[in-house]
Image (tube, grey):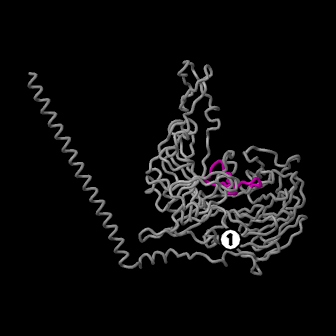
């Protein structure tokens, strides 16, 4: 059974406070002021059009968003589960429900409400048979279970004083005392959060999504190398821009789609979000969050590594500060930033802090010797500089020809001159593992620098193992290496250089070139084209008929107005003569 988890939010019409909508209902009561907000079937139909029609074609754990009027929804392809322990509810149990039922979880004892789609919403939810995990609809419950009107005890006589959440000044109906309702009482224990509930499709609805293999599903389908990161569990995070061909009539155009997704070490999709803004930089924090920056992204750029959704209550950061040459996240969650010819360190909230705790800040690093990186460097030419924070707490600074490793206090461990040609690329070319090894991607070499500064060539393009192309690197904690090239190419190598995965060797969905797509469209069967033309003709005829009817109605209204004015004139004239 296919199901889609959905979270809906709106704003109260009375007090304008955010209000979760955790049930499919005609009206929902505000948790702040107690006033109801009406939600019509037409509004629900517009909002749920995305989940209903995209659900069977979405990938598992893929998330999208929709916005209609005052309602906003975030929906994810996910099986129905308990809100308490997230144990999946068997599809057979849901399909057995004829009207409504309460399931008690045998693991955590939490109850889940399941019901069939109400008749009044059947038109808005085609192919949906059941709804699971809602808050009970107040209109379907006994009067004793309906929430009471919000009240505040009178400070003079103790009688309950009803209030609407907008006017904090009220009058007690018993003693006529003036009562001021404090905000702390209004929101105390009354504000709910948006909870997900599930739309369950009919069993005959086929799964139209591609196979769960990441390559077949089209995740490795970008033009330019993406921005990537790997966490301690070897989960891969990627922000990429994908392109596809769209045909409208006989014209074929190229459309782009910015996506951000995560897969586990077996390439099973953990979550996926489409239609995002283009990501310029993606940085993983050890605190379980993901920082994504770029034009159009929020000033609270932290995402959850578990779901890819924005982190609630995340701090706001000055986006101009994050517009930098390079950035990395240290083991304590602080950000190391290369900006304005300086190395800077800021807290996750965006506050400035010392770059090297407990160390004296040093200056210029423009010399060509490995010793050009002093202890505790701050001022430097950031035009060609890269920064990396290793999982063992080391800090790495690299320009086109040199690499230096520092302790957390700023003491330099080593400085080495890098051989071979610099990559000359804007993509990430520096990474490190938990053992203190650094990995540098050059134009035709992948070089490992040990914890003491010895260099070893891991891969080289001369022997065919390393592609000679623009690439980006992501290093796992154990020393496994991900490389990402253009045109959807990606490789994963073991610590010794053994190839573990190559996207170009996996099965892919067939992609039709733009010229072939246009040719297929033009060479469609004559009957199909005639059918399309007939549909267009019928639609045009219908449009003309509607215009004709509208014109007839307008003429009738004008004649009616003219007739009314004539009668009024005659009545006035007769009255005038009678008065004379």
Compared to residue 500, the image places residue 351 above or below, namely above
Mark 1 is surrounded, within 10 Å at the Cα level, by few (under 14), some (14 to 19) or many (20 or more) other residues, namely: many
**Element at label 1:** loop
Specify whether residue 470 is in view: yes
Q: Quadrant of the N terminus?
A: bottom right
The residue sitting at 53% across, 32% down in the picture is: 164
Of the pair 399 and 254, the residue shown nearer to us: 254
Position in image of residue 498 (x %, y %): 79, 77
Q: Is residue 83 left or right of residue 564?
A: right
Span colored in magenta: 285-306
The residue sitting at 31% across, 66% down in the picture is: 538
Q: Is residue 252 left or right of residue 282?
A: left
Q: Residue furthest bottom?
A: 463
Compared to residue 232, the image places residue 502 above or below, namely below
The residue sitting at 61% across, 76% down in the picture is: 508
Residue picked out by circle 1: 485
Compared to residue 359, the image places residue 64 above or below, namely below
Position in image of residue 305 (x %, y %): 70, 57
Specify whether residue 317 is in view: no
Q: Quadrant of the C terminus?
A: top left
Of the pair 35 and 48, the residue shown nearer to us: 35
């Amino acid at each position: 059974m296919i199901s889609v988890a959905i979270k809906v939010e709106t704003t109260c019409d009375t007090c304008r406070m955010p209000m979760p909508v955790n049930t499919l209902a005609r009206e929902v009561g505000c948790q702040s002021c107690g006033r109801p907000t009406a939600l019509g079937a037409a509004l629900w139909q517009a909002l749920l059009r995305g989940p209903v029609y995209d659900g069977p074609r979405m990938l598992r754990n893929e998330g999208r968003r929709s916005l209609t009027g005052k309602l906003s929804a975030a929906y994810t392809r996910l099986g129905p589960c308990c809100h308490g322990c997230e144990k999946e509810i068997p599809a057979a149990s849901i399909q057995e429900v004829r009207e409504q039922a309460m399931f008690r979880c045998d693991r955590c004892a939490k109850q889940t409400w399941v019901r069939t789609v109400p008749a009044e919403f059947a038109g808005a939810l085609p192919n949906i048979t059941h709804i699971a995990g809602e808050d009970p609809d107040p209109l379907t419950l006994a009067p004793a279970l309906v929430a009471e009107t919000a009240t505040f005890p009178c400070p003079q006589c103790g009688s309950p004083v009803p209030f609407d959440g907008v006017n904090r000044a009220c009058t007690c109906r018993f003693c006529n005392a003036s009562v001021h309702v404090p905000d702390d009482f209004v929101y105390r224990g009354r504000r709910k959060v948006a909870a997900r509930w599930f739309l369950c499709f009919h069993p005959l609805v086929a799964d139209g999504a591609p196979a769960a293999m990441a390559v077949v599903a089209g995740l490795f389908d970008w033009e330019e190398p993406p921005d990537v990161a790997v966490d301690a569990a070897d989960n891969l995070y990627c922000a990429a821009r994908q392109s596809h061909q769209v045909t409208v009539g006989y014209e074929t155009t190229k459309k782009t789609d910015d996506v951000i997704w995560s897969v586990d070490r077996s390439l099973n999709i953990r979550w996926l979000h489409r239609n995002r803004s283009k990501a310029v930089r993606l940085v993983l924090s050890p605190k379980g969050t993901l920082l994504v920056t770029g034009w159009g992204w929020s000033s609270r750029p932290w995402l959850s590594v578990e779901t890819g959704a924005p982190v609630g209550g995340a701090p706001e950061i000055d986006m101009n500060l994050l517009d930098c040459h390079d950035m990395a996240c240290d083991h304590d969650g602080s950000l190391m930033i290369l900006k304005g010819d300086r190395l800077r360190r800021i807290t996750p909230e965006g506050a400035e802090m010392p770059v090297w705790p407990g160390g004296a800040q040093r200056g210029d690093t423009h010399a060509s010797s490995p010793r050009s990186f002093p202890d505790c460097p701050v001022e430097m030419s950031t035009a060609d500089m890269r920064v990396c924070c290793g999982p063992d707490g080391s800090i790495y600074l690299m320009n086109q020809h040199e690499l230096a490793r520092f302790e957390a206090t700023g003491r330099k461990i080593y400085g080495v001159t890098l051989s071979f040609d610099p990559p000359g690329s804007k993509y990430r070319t520096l990474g490190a593992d938990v053992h203190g090894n650094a990995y540098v991607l050059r134009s035709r070499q992948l070089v490992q620098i040990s914890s003491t500064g010895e260099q070893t060539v891991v891969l080289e393009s001369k022997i065919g193992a390393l592609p000679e192309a623009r690439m980006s690197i992501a290093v796992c904690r154990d020393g496994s290496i991900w490389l990402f090239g253009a045109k959807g190419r990606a490789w994963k190598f073991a610590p010794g250089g053994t190839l573990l995965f190559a996207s170009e060797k996996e099965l892919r969905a067939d992609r039709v070139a733009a010229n072939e797509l246009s040719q297929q469209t033009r060479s469609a069967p004559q009957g199909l084209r005639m059918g399309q033309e007939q549909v267009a003709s019928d639609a045009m005829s219908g449009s003309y008929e509607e215009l004709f009817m509208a014109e007839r109605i307008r003429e009738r209204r004008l004649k009616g107005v003219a007739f009314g004015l004539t009668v009024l004139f005659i009545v006035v004239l007769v009255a005038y003569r009678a008065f004379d």
